[in-house]
Amino acid sequence: MQETLRIAVQKSGRLYEGSMKLLKECGIEVSNGNNQLRVIAANFPVEVFFLRDDDIPEYVQDAVADIGFVGENVVSEKNKEVDSIEKLGFGKCRLSLAVPKNGSMQSLNDLQGKKIATSYPFILSNFLKEKNITAAIHEISGSVEIAPKIGLADAICDLVSSGSTLFTNELKEIETILSSEAVLIKNKNLAAGKKNILESLLFRIRSVKKAKNNKYVLLNAPNDKLEVICGILPGMKSPTILPLAEPGWSSVHSVINEADFWNVIELLKTNGAQGILIIPIEKMII
Ligand code: PRT
Ligand code: ZN
């Protein structure tokens, strides 16, 4: 029987869609139409297990699953023996300390001797120890944000993404403890065959991620501006230049990083580029 790599993915919740989308973009067909707990991919040697996110680090540590897609916040809190090997670019959030907006507490030191509600007691206690703050940690599993209002705690330590939950509960962030996104974790002792499958999966994931971070640019430029325009557009190797039917003009093709996008476009325009087209890239292999 051919070896398969067992991937643990969140069954439902904030990481489910991102995880399934990533597998799909990697060309791996996993149909979970019947809400099954275990699905074998049709065209790649992987088997997907659908689990609660909190259980994924332990299952990967214990080799029930070989790898998992899970939040870095959960990996840090569970503190299991697994390797985090690749950030996946979705599920971004931060674990923060927050206090009542109109109260007297303003900064970290004001938490001295106070009570903090959280679902992340391990991360929080390490953080407080490091900062020499003695506070009581009250562990609760959900709706942490209402704890100050109902008198359960003075402050909270919880995940924040847009900040709207804090806002509606009249809380303000005073400190970020950890930035998090979904990450690929692996068992520490994968057999050679599984390692090979993981390598080809990682190759696909990295190609998808690179493509997302880059855009394909097409533009027209007068030939006397080509040198300066090519200097602005580094590309994967160097830009491709093709002559236009109109004498004295060329078409320039290249790839630019999403982060540099607006700066680069402005510069291209001021240096004589015209008809600039920006096209998303599906996969990028360097
Ligand atoms: O059932 P299961 O145990 O699998 O799921 P769960 O309910 O424990 O987790 P789930 O689906 O809520 O979150 C899964 C993972 O998504 C987390 O471990 C994080 O890695 C990531 N993630 C990203 C978030 C958020 N963003 C997030 N905003 N997890 C939770 N939140 C919550 C937060 O706790 C707070 O209640 O959303 C609220 C804040 O959001 P904003 O947008 O109002 O700031
Ligand atoms: Zn959970």
Image (cartoon, rainbow, N blue to C red):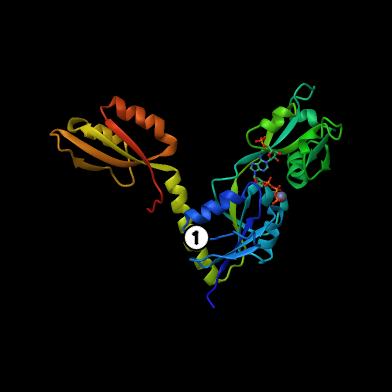
Q: Residue furthest bottom?
A: 1
Q: Nearer the viewer, residue 217 or 34?
A: 34
Number of marks in the rendered image = 1
* SS category of the residue bearing label 1: loop
Residue type, numbered disc 1: Ile
Q: Residue furthest left?
A: 247
263 vs 8, left or right, is left
Q: Position of residue 129 (x, y in %)?
A: 77, 41
Relative to residue 64, is residue 247 depicted above or below? above
**Residue in the picture at 52% in, 56% down:** 23
**Residue in the picture at 26% in, 30% down:** 274
Q: Nearer the viewer, residue 21 or 109?
A: 21
94 vs 170, left or right, is left
Q: Nearer the viewer, residue 245 or 204?
A: 245
Q: Residue furthest front?
A: 34
Q: Nearer the viewer, residue 109 or 275?
A: 275
Relative to residue 284, is residue 229 depicted above or below? above
**Residue in the picture at 44% in, 48% down:** 210
Relative to residue 45, is residue 87 depicted above or below? above
- Quadrant in the picture for residue 249: top left
- Residue 163 in view here: yes
Relative to residue 73, is residue 61 depicted above or below? below
Residue at label 1?
Answer: 28
Mark 1 Cα-neighbour bin, 10 Å: few <14, some 14–19, many ≥20: some
Q: Position of residue 272 (x, y in %)?
A: 25, 27
- Residue 131 in view here: no
Question: In which quadrant of the rendered image does the N terminus lie?
Answer: bottom right
4 vs 149, left or right, is left
**Residue in the picture at 60% in, 64% down:** 39
Q: Residue furthest right?
A: 151
